[in-house]
Image (cartoon, helix red, strand yellow):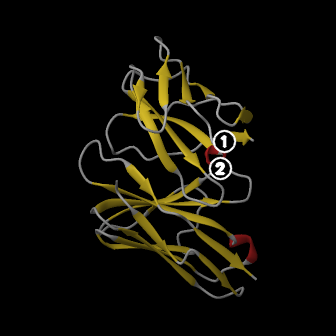
Amino acid sequence: GAVVSQHPSRVICKSGTSVKIECRSLDFQATTMFWYRQFPKQSLMLMATSNEGSKATYEQGVEKDKFLINHASLTLSTLTVTSAHPEDSSFYICSARGGGDGYEQYFGPGTRLTVT
Amino acid sequence: DAKTTQPTSMDCAEGRAANLPCNHSTISGNEYVYWYRQIHSQGPQYIIHGLKNNETNEMASLIITEDRKSSTLILPHATLRDTAVYYCIVRAAGGYQKVTFGTGTKLQVIP
């Protein structure tokens, strides 16, 4: 099956700094990637959708200037949390989908971000 | 996408069948029923999906009622590793619809 990886699996950063999370599709070309956020004991919330070579589309309430998404290639998308604060601490999960009708969404293993 | 309703939590004895229900009374004719699960601190894992016929794969079986307003995911012999949150999602046919998650059912498999 299709594999999606994320790096790092967990990261701790200080308040005010920026942190980048990478999402890669390992064995297929991902024309569309999705970024989700999950707080403890809650469900996954979609943050944004990005198509390769285009600007990301953000869900309502998600600050696009704070959560920078780059989808520059068909196998890599990055999420940068800028000026991170403790309330940004969360589990970030990416998902990737190939092109064409019927291609499913495959999920990465997630990245645990802790802002101190 | 149609809304789904699932019980918040369920327990199942190890080795027994786990039957997880899902109501989707507003499902449209072109919408599929998908099931994913999320084991603690991991990304979601696809389990199975179907349109109107019952489906079975190596992980589970999916039973969809004739009126398509509800479905049941069956794990035939639950193991401790099946402890997870199970999400029932309905979405339109084709790969272009994004997956959005409800609250799911927390399944606890008990030794």
Q: Which residue is located at x 30 percent, y 47 percent?
A: A103
Q: Which residue is located at x 27 percent, y 63 percent?
A: A29
Q: Label 2 belongs to which residue?
A: A43
Quadrant where the C terminus of chain A lies? Answer: bottom right
Classed neighbour count for the residue bearing mark 2: other residues with Cα under 10 Å, few (<14), some (14–19), many (≥20):
some
Say left or right for B21 vs B47. Answer: right
Residue B44 got which mark?
none
Q: Decide: is A30 above or below A13.
A: above
Q: Label 1 belongs to which residue?
A: B103
Mark 2 residue element: loop
Q: Position of residue B20 (x, y in %)?
A: 62, 29
Q: Decide: is A84 above or below A44.
A: below
Q: How far, Cα to Cα, is label 2 from label 1?
A: 5 Å
At label 1, the amino acid type is Thr
Q: Which residue is located at x 41 percent, y 34 percent?
A: B57
Q: Are marks 2 and 1 in contact (CB under 8 Å)?
A: yes
